[in-house]
Image (cartoon, rainbow, N blue to C red):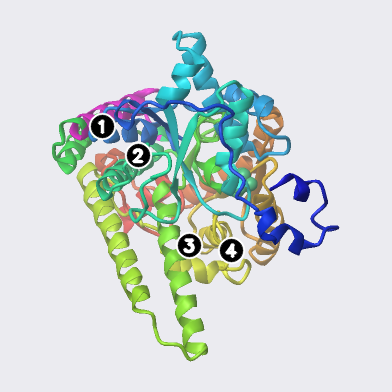
Amino acid sequence: MNSKCSAMSMIEKDATQCNAPENKITQWRETPTKKILYAPKEETMILLGGLTNLQDKLIETALCSLSPNFIALPNPNLESFQKGKAFGNRGQCNPTYFTVGNLVKYLQELRDKQGLTTEEIVKKYALVTVGGCGPCRFGMYITEYKKALRDAGFDGFRITSIAQNKGIFQESDKEEDILDLSPKFFIILLKAIIIGDIINLLGYKMRPYEIEAGSVDKAMEACRVIVSKAFEQKTNLPKALWDCRKVLKKVKLNRLQPKAKILVMGEFWAAMTEGDGNYNLHRFLEAEGAECTPQPIINRLMLTFWEAEYKLKKIETLAVENGKKIDFSNVKSRLLIKMAKIAVKIHFGIYAKAIGLYNYEIPNMKKLATLGEQYYTLDCEGGEGHLEVAHLIESVKDNLSHLTISIKPFGCMPSSAVSDGVQSLVTSHYPSANFLSIETSGEGAANFYSRVQMALFKAKQAAIEEYEILNIPRNIPQKVHNYLYQPHNKKTGTAAQLIASLRD
Ligand code: SF4
């Protein structure tokens, strides 16, 4: 904005004055204060991260099979959070502080521990993140990164983003020229995400029942190495997952322990991260004798496809209402979305079968939309939208968990509105729901844990009652302890499901 316009309040001044040709308004851009000669694309190291620990590592290896320049950032910790607070704007949400601070921390370590100069770092490194328009701060993450980096001494550090809602149909970042956002890039990225989801889901199903502490983590790490090699050597991924099955089969489990099943959901990052960002909630629950059901990334992907289809339907309905012709580019878009959805489901199915994850149902977005729309508009896109409400109702109706925890980051407006506001109405209509909405602020872990423990007590009781009410056969076949035995029935807890399956 020019100085004449900026000197006056937009409310007070005559808007036409600023639109006059002599006072041309230009788009504000966050540009470095001095010109920087950046390293060419082939020499630029691309930092990425922000998903689960396993997925970040798998993505790094998978993308390095295209070009050797990708580095996964370490998992954000409390130090990251403190750096985010020190260099970020006031009043940001918790995930912003953790992720922005994590990048600052990593760059500072490159400078202070590896001896690179600030200039070298700014010239040679860049971050790729996911961006998009949302009903919240998600839409301004890049600006927040740039502000914090400038204040931390890394002015001009390059950041590029992948649009959250465009999938493989992205435009290359011509302006920054850091990444080739080719279909090949996205296909490899998606494969790594899907495989990461599957191994993580198995880890959460197995870890609470391991006989030897740490054996599941060890097996999962071995699986990561096998899959990473397959990505590196461009060999057959289902075959690699079949080899992982052999590793997992060796882990000794005792699955007849009635443990509370906890559905962990809420704000995308806070519910998914495995570290200080949510006080290590998943591990805490497991240590307290529970089994977690996490939200895999594929759920978010399915929501993105659903949102795209929903939007197209609205456009077509409006066109018909206004007597306009159907735009055939919409028909093409619909077909592309359908094909992408089928491709993701097929890949998930093949990989899941190969490693031995059976009976996992990818969420049915139409069913969830129907469940959620009575309480939350379907028109709100960007975050989890109606999904959080729908998951709670589905969990109660289909007996999916003994406790549902919704994580809402401190400072997150959408999360507070849903978890504290809308869910209160839902729980009043579904009084059997054991629901806990809990805030993560980065500090105050003791308070967080004690609230989780209180809700967990009721869930544990429910799991024990569900199990003890069953007629437990005298001779229980050994197969119930094999992770490949995954019966599907109306019981909630794993132990109860296994016993019930013997009687079916
Ligand atoms: S949903 Fe909440 S926590 Fe997540 S980016 Fe938006 S404001 Fe932040």
Q: Over which residues does the magenta segment extend?
A: 209-231
Left or right: 152, with 488 as reference point: right
Looking at this view, is 25 or 363 the one in front? 25
Name the amino acid type tagged 4. Answer: Cys
Residue beneath disc 4: 380
Q: What separation in Å lies between label 2 and label 3 (alpha carbons)?
A: 44 Å
Asked whether 215 falls inside the magenta stretch, the response is yes
Q: Nearer the viewer, mark 4 or mark 2?
A: 2
Name the amino acid type tagged 2. Answer: Leu
* Precedes in sequence: disc 4 or disc 3: 4
Vertical position of residue 500 compared to residue 258: above or below: below
Q: What separation in Å lies between label 2 and label 1 (alpha carbons)?
A: 10 Å
Name the amino acid type tagged 1. Answer: Ser
Asked whether 285 falls inside the magenta stretch, the response is no
Residue beneath disc 1: 67
Q: Which mark is residue 179?
A: 2
Q: Nearer the viewer, mark 4 or mark 1?
A: 1
Element marked by disc 2? loop
Name the amino acid type tagged 3. Answer: Asp
Vertical position of residue 147 compared to residue 188: above or below: above
Q: What separation in Å lies between label 4 and label 2 (alpha carbons)?
A: 30 Å
Q: Nearer the viewer, mark 3 or mark 1?
A: 1
Element marked by disc 3? loop
Quick check: is the Cβ at mark 4 less than 8 Å away from ligand 1? no
Residue beneath disc 3: 398
Q: Position of residue 4 (x, y in %)?
A: 77, 48
| Among the 4 quarters of the image, the one containing residue 85 | top right
Element marked by disc 1? loop
